[in-house]
Every structure is written in structure tokens, then in C-alpha cells.
Image (cartoon, rainbow, N blue to C red):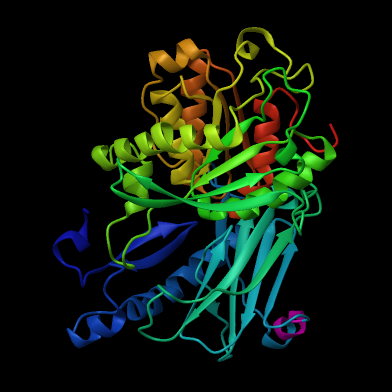
Amino acid sequence: MSGPAASDPFAVWTYTEAGEEIAGGHLSVTDAQRAAAGRQTLAERSAALLPVNRKRAAGQYAAGGLPEGQDVMRVWQPRDPAGLRARLTEPPLAVWGEGDVLHVLWQGEADEVQLSGGVQPRLWPVEGTVDLWEASLRIRRLDEAVISLAVLPLRAGQSQFGQVMTDPRVWRGPRAPAAIPAAWPLRGRLEEHELDSVPLDEPRRVTVYRPPGADGGLPGYADGGLPACVLADGQSTAVFAAVLESAIGTGALPPVLLVGVHHAVPPGPYGPDLRAMEYVPGHDREQFDAHLAFVTDEVLPWATERFGPPGGRFGPPGGRFGRPGGRFGRRAGPWLAAGCSNGGAWAIAAAQRRPDVFGAVAAFSAGIVPGKVSRAARSAGVRHYLGAGLLEPGFRRATGEWADRITRAGLPVRHEEWAGGHDHLWWEQRLPVALGWLLGGSGEPGA
């Protein structure tokens, strides 16, 4: 840790995001503890910043458009409370767009209200009311955007940890891509397993999705097996499987076996970030290597013995699944690696280190600065699908830099940027597209 909190855990500082100056502090210290120590609280700093933030946001609203290099900016204008209340047709949350501005309004009693999902600003109290909270954001390509939202209302001194998000919504722009529906109930099978790991020195859960028909084997693959994908953050396997199964049903991609490896669970909210230690190279080399060994030397041999060797080929579009496709369609059988956020960083890093195991990568919102592309990965021709949202600047930048680095290394890559944020909804929707493309099809529904 660096910065003020490294030497003073009670310190409050500010940072700027989307044109707003935001108060920050150490997550392990509550405002009640700051107040008891006679220190300024986050709530006090936020209240002091609000007039300046409103003035700045009002200027941005009046200026129109977005500053160069900005894809989202907080804007504001005075609102009539009665007019806002009329917007609450489905209380307590209203979300609507006006031109390139997204408005969010929440009604309820709280001392602080935080949004979660594709955009994550703090809501500001509406002047002249005690129960209305609002945020307005000017967003590039808003008409194409898909943004999930949830609300976290907090009382004074209450920690965010352990609190339940409320009022989930999904806002879709008029030109947003059609959603791949979730296939509930699943026709395929979800299986829960627990493996004792020697490298990790503990048991770890694995969730496996077997697509419809996999029990009896699926014909049509020269290698005799299903394409198989290792998914980081295996706790989310079920939600990915529901969208994947729907895409399989339309023929957008072939049936795929999904092996979701669960990440480590920290003992409490203020403990070490065990997930980052296992997923991000350089965070904790020993733990990263142990987790990679668990996946490659224990999980995959176990899965191969239980479900059969992976099949399918990785190749560029131009034929149906399983056909060879030039230089990058010659190999059959390696696993795909997939993940989002730190899990996406792990998928890239795993294929860099073990291209003999992982022949293709689907990585979304990978948040680490790229290193060198390994000689082994270049030689193996590892294929990459990389994507990130316009509204997650750090993750977008790192993912784009990875795409540039991989392109310069001469590897096949498809890089996309969607009108959204650091949003699980986007990751769920793009996984079928990514796997379809990596396996040699277009990956698009109806293609």
C-alpha cells in the first residue's frame, strides 16, 4: 500500500473520477472510528466537496459534449423535485436517457447512496428533499450502451462490506445489441466437485457445465471430444452457462464443456486479496505459480479423465467449427482459458506460461499492464479474444495495450470495446461470442 493510508489509516484524501472530486479513505476504518479519534470523516469531506462538484458538473452540462479523451463525465442541473417524483413510475428507482445523458434517481432514506454495476457514482441528495438521490452522467455512445445498476444505501458510519445491493435494473440504449437470453432452466448439467490440491495445500471447489447431450458424447468432432474451457472465478459458472447454452442452441458456437475453478475466499473483508494473489502475475509469485500448477497439473488431468480429452480446433472464421484454418487452425485439443477482470489477467498469463496447455484465450476487462509476449506463446500461435468497456478506463487501457502487444507479436487477436462498464452482464454476453470466434466461427448469434 502507498499513499496517505500507508502511514495513517484514519486519513481521508480525494481523487477525481468522471470530473467529480471524490473522498476516499482506508476501507478497514469506519467513519464512526474516525469521529471517535477526532478526525474528519468521509461523510464530512464529501459534504464539503458537494457544492464545488455541483458547480463543476453544471458547467459540464451547459458545455455539452465530452472533453477530449473522456468517455463519461458527471453533469448536473437544478431539478424540480415534483418533476423528479413523476419519474418514479416504478419506485424506488428510475433510470432514463436524454440525448447523451443517463439519469438515475433513487427514493429512500439514507445518509449515503452508492451505485454499483456498469457505472458506480455516488448519488447526490436532491436539493429541497430528504428522500431523493440522483446522478447524471454524459456517456459516449449512450445509444448503444447496456448498463446494469444496483443501489447500496448506507447509514452514517456503516461499512459497505456485507451490505446487500437493492433495486437491480438494466438500462439499454435504443441501438444496444440484442441480448442473448439466459436458458433457464438449463438442459445441460451443472456439477459441483471439490479437489484436494497439493500445490494449494487445501481443497478447492470446481463447477463443471456439461452441455445438452454431453453425457452420451457428441458426434461431429474429428478429435472425438468437446471443446473445453477453463473459467476463472468458477463461482460464476452457472450464470455463464445459462447464456452459453442459449447461444449453443442457436448454433452461434458448438457445445463447449465449461470447467469453472473457484477462486480463493478471504477470511474476512479486510484480509489479503487472495484472489489477486492467485490471478495477477507479480502480486504474489509463489501463490500465482501454485494456483497455475493446480489448474494445469491437477484440475485438467482430472477433467480429462472424467469427461474425456478436449476436442475442437482454433482457427479464423471461414468455415464451420472444427475445420482447420491456416496457420492457426492446425492444432486440435488444447484447452481454452477464459476470465474477467483479474480472472482475465489470469487467462492471458496462463496461456503465456503454458501454451502447451492453453491454445486460446477469452479475456474481458483485464486490469494488468502487459508484459512481453512469451516466445512459447508466439511459437504456439495462441489465439486471443480481448474486450473491455468504454466506461472502465483503467481496464480498457490495459486490455487495449494487451491487444496491441499481441498483434505486434504476430498472434491472431480480436479486440472489441463495448458501450458499458466493468459489468458482469457484458462479460456473460460476450463469452459465447468470444468462444465462437476462437473456435473458428463468427461467434455472433444468427451468423
Which secondary structure dominates the residues rendered in magenta?
A: helix
Please identify the quarter of the rendering in which residue 413 is found.
Answer: top right
Residue under the point 54% across and 16% down: 411
Q: What x and y, as percent, mark residue 189? A: 68, 50
Residue drawn at x 72%, y 39% is: 214
Hey, which residue is sitting farthest top in the picture?
326
Q: Residue at x 75, y 51 (%)?
A: 143
Quick check: 143 above or below 348?
A: below
Q: Is residue 270 magenta?
A: no
Q: Quadrant of residue 284?
A: top left
Left or right: residue 171 versus residue 71 is right
Please tell me which residue lies in front, 123 or 330.
Answer: 330
Vertical order, 178 against 164 (above or below): above
Number of labels in the image equals 0
Picture quarter containing residue 119?
A: bottom right
Q: Is residue 99 left or right of residue 124?
A: right
Q: Which quadrant of the figure contains the C terminus?
A: top right
Quadrant into which the N terminus falls: bottom left
User: Is residue 411 or residue 186 the one in the foreground?
Assistant: 186
Q: Which residues are magenta?
A: 84-88
Q: Residue at x 55, y 23 (%)?
A: 334
Residue 203 falls left or right of residue 311? left
Q: Position of residue 378 (x, y in %)?
A: 46, 13
